[in-house]
Every structure is written in C-alpha cells, then in structure tokens.
Image (spheres, grey):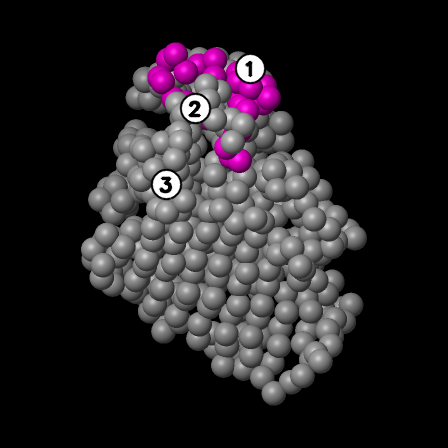
C-alpha cells in the first residue's frame, strides 16, 4: 500500500511563496501600463452579469485609485441603467459603441458581450486607438479570430484575454512542477472536467446553448481548459480529433415550456429554476426583457438548443504530447481530474471529487462560492497534487492552500496584475494575449469542425499563426 510522503516545510513554504508572489502577466499588460499618477480610463461594452460584476463593480470597489469608468455600452437601455446603479458609477451610457468611444476617449475597452460579437467590438476598439481586455473566449470561429489578429498587427494596440484560471493557486502550482520537470519530459495528459446538473444546465438555459451565439461549449467553456493545457504543455496544438453529441438537453425530453416562470411542468422537471428568487437577476434581466427579448430562464429543453452536451477531444501537440480531454454537462458533482504522464513519473491532481472531499457541498452553493470575489484562503484546507516517480513506492503530496472563491483565487490575482502592478515578475508566463486567446479557441473550433466533418483537423488550417513546438 502506498504511503503519502508530505513535502518538507521548506519545500511547501517555497511553493506557497511562489504562488503568492510570482504568478502574473507580462507583455500584454505592460504595454497598457499607465503612469502611477493617472487613472486608466475604462469603457465597458456588455452589461450582463460578468460585465457588471467582475469587470464592473469589482474594479470600482477595489481599483478606484488606478482606474475609472468613463462610459458603458449595451444594446439594452434597461440593463445600462441597472449597471450604473449596481456598479456605483456616474458616467454616460450608450447604445452605440462608436459614439461611446468617440465621446469618452477610453484608453482600454473591456468587452463582455455575447461571445459571437466579441470580434466586432475588439476590432473596432483597436481601430479607434484603444487597447482591449476581453472576456474569454476571444471569439467563436476562425474567420473572426483572424480578423482580430490582423487588427492587432495593423493598429499596434494590444489585447488581453481574461484567462483567470491560469492564476488559480492549484493550476499555478502544477505549472511550477511541470516547469521544473519533476517527472521528466511530459508525454501525455488525461484531463476530464465535470459540470454538475446545476452549473451545467445553466448554459443550456442561456444564449450559450445556441451555437451561433456561443460557438458551443467546446469554445465557450473549454477555452479555459484548452488554454491551461497550452500553458502547462508549453507547446502549440497541432491536430485535433473530437466526438460530441446532444443527447440530454434540448429536444431530448418529452415536455418543454417557454421558460421556467411560465412552465406547466415545474412539478415534474428536476431542472426547474426560479429566477424570481434572485433579485439581481430580476432587476438585470426579467425587468429588461421588453427591450431586446432576451430570456435568462429559458427552457433547457427548447428545440433551439443545438450545442453538444457531451464532448471528447484528442489533441496532438507540436512537441508530441498527446492529450485526452472530456467535458460532461450533467454530472452529480462539479469537479475535474488531471494526470500528466512523464518519462520519469506521473503528476495527478483533482478538485471536487466527492470521495476525496472532507465534506459534501451543495452543488448550487459550490458554484456561488466559485464566483464569489470576496472569498478568502482557508488555512485549514488544501488541494492536493500527487507526484510519483517511476520505480518508487511512495509519493510526494503537494498541499496547496485552498481558495474556493474567485476561481481558485485567480480572479483577484489577474486584476491585481492588470491594474495595480503590470510590471510584476512573471516567471511562469501567466500573461495571455491574442496568440494565447487564439490557440485556446482554435482547439475548440477544430474540435467542432472535426465532429461535423468526421475527420482530424489541423490547427494550421484555421489561421495564419505559425505552429511552434516550444512556445518559449
């Protein structure tokens, strides 16, 4: 029977110190740095939940000495008014993006609109002389991706992609171990992500459930996971083969309603969700449906749902690493498992696996904790990374202090880097620009194309980015 061999105190404290001090952005952020005496002028386009909270109120509450909002834009005037009140700002609002930029002269435009429109606002902002921070995914297809790359090259302005997962403590520690080659050259990776029936179902209620808006979850959600893989492996994806089906949500049910509020089947639908219990969603969405018709509590059984709800992807990298990845959208628990197979051993890590947890957590509460920007480190809890060498019967158990809120502590560390210390040391290359944004979505786009065309898809087919075996 194997025995855990905890790392010594010096090794452990060193790991924690690296996570706290060293994990942050480089070139894209440095190019946006402003003199300490001035505030960066921000404009936000897209005033949904993510825009008004993480890229809105959170910046106002925590970075008001460094940045200020000079304009907000959305196609929905009701959401704009909510955004002003919720964020606590006093700036002009616009339904016309170019008018906002012309009148307010922002230095940075933050894009948090529907995924399929990211390219429109990114390209226009660059052409109008602004730098850009965009929510992931950068965009939803290869043509739009190429247009963003071309615009950045032509204008000389810069784009940051908000890959907060890189900044999470556990993910950063994995990067450190891989960089130090703790198990030698990595040859293959097994990565499996499980969305529970609360979080997973939410994508199918929203516009994300329609391919033309979100590009499928292989682009919208998996862009996080593919970016982590690219970053960890430190190479470019070369070829993708994928399988996917829609066999649970959408038309795969005997009943459906217009939305949860008006549904006649609430007594028999296990996925019933009462939006009226969430005051913020009522004020942001329900009260403003009259302006643009967007329904936040759509029926997840509606026939318009046309994305995959189970996905399996095989990725071959330019440095010969092979990856097996899967995404499940109706698991009884929320979590993930990963294993890096090396020439000299193996690294395993996980989160949210019930039989490894100390206590069971309500799945709705778990998602709320994940999104909470005010969560703090739990000194009594930790996440685990197991490092085992070939020919040895014991393993090192690396304990990473647990932060459940704000995407494992990644949210605050990402924004600290952008707004407080753009020149902070970045030994593990957390920086994410357009190339990173492109490579992550191109895996998802290639996977989608592979499913549709039933063939392997080479990344080089999609854009003009040269493929590199070592990203450097």
Residue shown at 45%/22% (left/top)?
Answer: 263
Q: Find out whether residue 295 is within the magenta segment.
A: yes
Q: CA distance from mark 3 to mark 1?
A: 40 Å
Tell me if residue 453 can be seen. Answer: yes
Q: Secondary structure at mark 3?
A: loop
Above or below: residue 62 compared with residue 32: above
Q: Which mark is residue 259?
A: 2
Q: What residue is disc 1 on?
A: 85
Residue 123 is left or right of residue 137, and the answer is: left
Task: State which tag comes first along the sequence, 3 or 1.
Answer: 1
Q: CA distance from mark 3 to mark 2?
A: 16 Å
Frontmost of labels 2 and 1 is 2
Q: Find out whether residue 109 is within the magenta segment.
A: no
Q: CA distance from mark 2 to mark 1?
A: 27 Å
Image quadrant where one finds the N terminus: bottom right
Image quadrant where one finds the C terminus: bottom left
Q: What residue is disc 3 on?
A: 252
Residue 273 screen position, x and y as percent = 53, 29
Residue 378 is left or right of residue 47, and the answer is: right
Please state the extent of the stretch shown in magenta in the rendering: 269-297
Q: Secondary structure at mark 2?
A: loop
Above or below: residue 171 compared with residue 70: below
Residue closer to the observer: 117 or 91: 117
């Amino acid at each position: 029977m194997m025995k855990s061999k905890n790392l010594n105190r010096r090794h452990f404290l060193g790991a924690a110190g690296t996570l706290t001090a060293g994990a942050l952005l480089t070139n894209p952020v440095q190019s946006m740095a402003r003199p300490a005496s001035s505030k960066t002028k921000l404009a936000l386009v897209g005033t949904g939940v993510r825009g008004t909270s993480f890229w809105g109120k959170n910046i106002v509450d925590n970075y008001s000495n460094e940045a200020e909002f000079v304009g907000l834009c959305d196609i929905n005037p009701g959401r704009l008014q909510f955004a002003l009140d919720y964020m606590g700002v006093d700036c002009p609002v616009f339904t016309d993006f170019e008018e906002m930029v012309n009148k307010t002269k922002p230095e940075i435009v933050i894009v948090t609109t529907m995924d399929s429109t990211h390219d429109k606002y990114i390209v226009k902002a660059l052409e109008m002389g602004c730098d850009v921070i965009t929510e992931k995914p950068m965009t939803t297809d290869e043509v739009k991706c190429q247009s963003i790359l071309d615009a950045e090259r032509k204008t000389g302005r810069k784009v940051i992609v908000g890959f907060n997962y890189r900044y999470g403590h556990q993910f950063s520690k994995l990067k450190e171990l891989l960089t130090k080659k703790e198990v030698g050259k990595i040859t293959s990776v097994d990565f499996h992500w499980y969305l529970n029936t609360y979080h997973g179902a939410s994508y199918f209620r929203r516009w994300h459930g329609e391919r033309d808006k979100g590009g499928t979850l292989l682009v919208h959600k998996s862009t996080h996971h593919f970016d982590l893989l690219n970053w960890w492996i430190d190479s470019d994806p070369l070829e993708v083969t994928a399988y996917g089906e829609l066999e649970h949500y959408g038309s795969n049910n005997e009943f459906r309603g217009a939305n949860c509020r008006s549904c006649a089947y609430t007594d028999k639908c296990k996925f019933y969700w009462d939006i009226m219990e969430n005051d913020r969603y009522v004020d942001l969405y329900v009260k403003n449906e009259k302006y643009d018709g967007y329904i936040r509590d759509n029926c997840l059984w509606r026939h318009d749902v046309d994305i995959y709800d189970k996905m399996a992807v095989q990725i071959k990298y330019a440095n010969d690493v092979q990856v097996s990845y899967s995404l499940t959208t109706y698991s009884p628990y929320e979590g993930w498992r990963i294993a890096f197979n090396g020439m000299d051993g193996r690294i395993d890590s996980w989160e949210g696996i019930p039989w490894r947890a100390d206590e069971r957590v309500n799945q709705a509460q778990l998602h709320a904790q994940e999104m909470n920007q005010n969560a703090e480190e739990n000194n009594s809890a930790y996440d685990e990374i197991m490092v085992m060498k070939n020919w040895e019967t014991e393993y090192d158990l690396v304990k990473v202090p647990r932060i459940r809120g704000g995407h494992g502590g990644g949210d605050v560390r990402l924004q600290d880097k952008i707004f407080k210390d753009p020149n902070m040391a970045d030994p593990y290359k957390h920086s994410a620009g357009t190339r990173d944004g492109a490579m992550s979505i191109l895996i998802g786009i290639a996977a989608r194309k592979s499913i549709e065309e039933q063939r392997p898809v080479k990344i080089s087919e999609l854009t003009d980015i040269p493929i590199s075996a070592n990203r450097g």
